[in-house]
Image: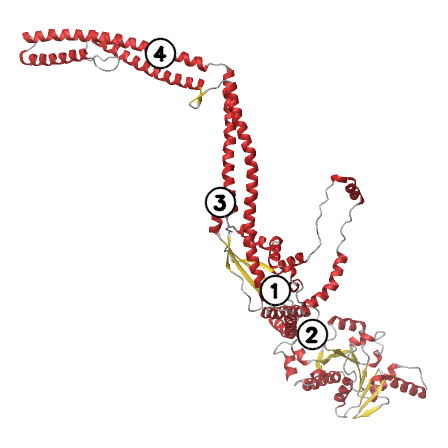
Amino acid sequence: MTKPVQERRITWTKDNAHLLAGYRDEPRVDMGSILRAMRRQAPLAIICALTGIVIAVLMILGSLPRYTAVETVLLDEERAELLNEVSPLPNAVWSDTAVQSEIEIIKSRALAYQVVDLLNLDEDADFLSPPVGATQRVLGLVSLVTDPLARLLTPAPPAPSASGSDESESGGGTAVELDFNLDVTDRDRAVQILRDRLSVSRSGRSLVIEIGFTDFEPRRAAMIARGYGWSYEGFQLVTTNEIAAKAEGWLRERLDRLEQKSMEAAAAVQEFRATNDLVEVRGNLLTEQQQSELASALMNASANAAEAEAQLESMESLLARSREGEEVITVPFVEGQFGAGNEALRRDYLDGRLRYRRLVTQFGPDHPQAQQLKSSLDLLREAIEVELEQATEAARVSYLMSRSREESLRADLEAITGSSDTAVALRGRLQQLEAISETYAQVYRDYLARLEVATQQQNFPIAAIKIISPAEVPKSASSPQKKAMLFAGMLLGGMLGVLIGAARELLPKPIRTVSTLRQELGLSCVGLLPGRKSLDDRGAAAARSRTLERLAQACEVNLKSPGGLLVGIAPLSSGLEDPTALPVALAAHLSRNGARRVMVIHEDPAHAPASSESKDGIETVSLPAVLDSWSETKSVVGGQGFDFGLLAKHLRDEFSFVIVALRPISEASRSDPHAWAYDTTLLRIPWGQVLPGFLTDALLDHPRFRDSLATTVLEDAQLATARRYMNRGSYEELEINA
């Protein structure tokens, strides 16, 4: 059954637990290590920050004050619209691109030349040769070294080929050589200085442009800033006039050509009409006029014929109904009106029929008056029928006449429209010539109108900008910016210190704590021996006494009875403050106030006294003296050869502890040269001078010394620095601060 996954902590450094607690390889975030690293490197960061502040102060003191004057210009939309009304080419709307274009115009060399000429800056020696501060001088000295290197690394421009020069010479008079004056004059240098010190920016998203100029003289800075405003306004006026003048010249040239073309086109039309006898009446040609009139008459005749045909059909229908016995009392004429006789018959007929109906209603149809009225009505009906027959014949005659007129007009129209193809081609060519002539005339009128507008614009003294805040003489210097430079120096220096400190923490660190030896290398360590720099530390004496006591205990643990113990004590490397102090101090602890005999043997005669010394049970001698004395003794006894084992046994029998102060093991010419001289070994490690890898390699090179190693000691320690590498509240820290 699997266990639940436990949360792992991420470590900033390698996590090795104490040997007694076992090895632990799970990662974790060691905030204590991070805080200790910050505490250790804080002085470095502070020193770098203070160095940055000092450099900033030096730069401020070595820099000359500069003053910036600002001229504020508004891109006026209302004036731009007014210019659009009189401009032959409409101006662009003030978009972001247009505003950026105006900024580039202000930065241009053309405008800078105008400012130079306006203020005569090329004749101002102070402007052309500004004062130089100490900071600039230092930078100039640096450039004296870097510029030659840059020129050395810059490839030379390609030389012109001989063939090219020969070709130019062979060209003779056909080749045109342009003489460009590329020499740098005072005017050019003044322009370059102007552009280097000029700053142009847009105020937010508005149409306001701020023109700033920086100079060592406040009044000159304000004067040049105002000069830029005036020059920019004049530049727009001149540019507008130049555009209008160029447009006018071009338009006049085009108008001359268009006038000639228009006159030639009109003359061609008139000549073609006269040649082909094409007479125009009321805006149309004669044939076209006749065709139009015949078509109109034909349409009227067709309408009249249709009307006559309808009347005829109506008359014939009425006549047929009358003959079939149907009562018909209306007889219309061709003109659509009733005649006087027809109207009288109709009225008499209607009156008689009304009386007849009354008599029949009162007296019946057989009444004599009713019979008489009926006879009168029959006669009237016959008269109306005769009138109807006459009207029908008249309608037929009118219809035939209308039909005949329609056919005659149609024949005439067909005769006119059915003319030859030559006439059609002539009319088409005439229309083409007229179209060309009208086009030239229209283009000429348009260009003439544009010429009038361009002429008006040349004398229109309005620019599309407005100066809303003239530059004033600055009262305070704009640079050097003291607060910003101090803050930047402190920030950059502090960041550099943090980077250096981080690099120091990430790189392998020398051995400075007991825990490093115990946890990372697995070596026993009795503690720290304070160096000279830690003598004033309140825990130095206690730490030294405690470490020496532990070192003595480590030796006494290995003491076997009977016989003494040979202790080899050697530094890891050279560089200890006092190589003889520790053996002598350890001997004093091991003697226990003279209760034990202790000998201190120095391998290096320079560290031993000239002759053997004995004090409080402690005898100090050099190793060569011991060897010489032992050789003489053996020779007296009868000598069986030089035996180091017998010498060691003799020393054990004579002394309780024999401390052999060896040279640094890293400087030994061969591995373990004095292995006979120790039963147990002590290693002196210079505090903060060697890396863990160096110690490991040195012990691997001296296996006998390593196998007999009882413990180690960190010598010449700086307790104030060592505390920064210890865990706060750890046993090691409490021991030092006790």
Which amino acid, mark 3?
A: Val
Of labels 2 and 1, earlier in sequence is: 1
Q: How far apart are the alpha carbons under marks 2 and 4?
A: 135 Å
Q: Is residue 718 visible?
A: yes
Of labels 1 and 3, earlier in sequence is: 3
Which-is-in-front pick, marks 3 and 2? 3
Above or below, comparing residue 723 to residue 609 in the picture:
above
Which amino acid, mark 4?
A: Arg
In-image side of 325 versus 396 (left or right): left
Of labels 2 and 4, earlier in sequence is: 4
Q: Given contact means CB atoms under 8 Å apart, are the residues at marks 3 and 4 in contact?
A: no
Classify 10 Å Cα crowding around label 2: few (below 14), some (14-19), many (20 and above).
some
Residue assigned mark 3: 86
Which amino acid, mark 2?
A: Thr
Q: How far apart are the alpha carbons under marks 1 and 3?
A: 41 Å
Name the residue: 75% across, 70% down: 693
Q: How far apart are the alpha carbons under marks 4 and 1?
A: 103 Å
Q: Given contact means CB atoms under 8 Å apart, are the residues at marks 2 and 4 in contact?
A: no
Of helix, strand and loop, which one carries label 3?
Answer: helix
The residue nearer to you, when weighing 540 against 697, is: 540
Residue 215 is labelled as 1
Residue assigned mark 4: 405
Residue 528 placement (x, y as % from top left): 70, 81
Residue assigned mark 2: 516
Residue 595 placement (x, y as % from top left): 76, 92
In-image side of 279 versus 341 (left or right): right
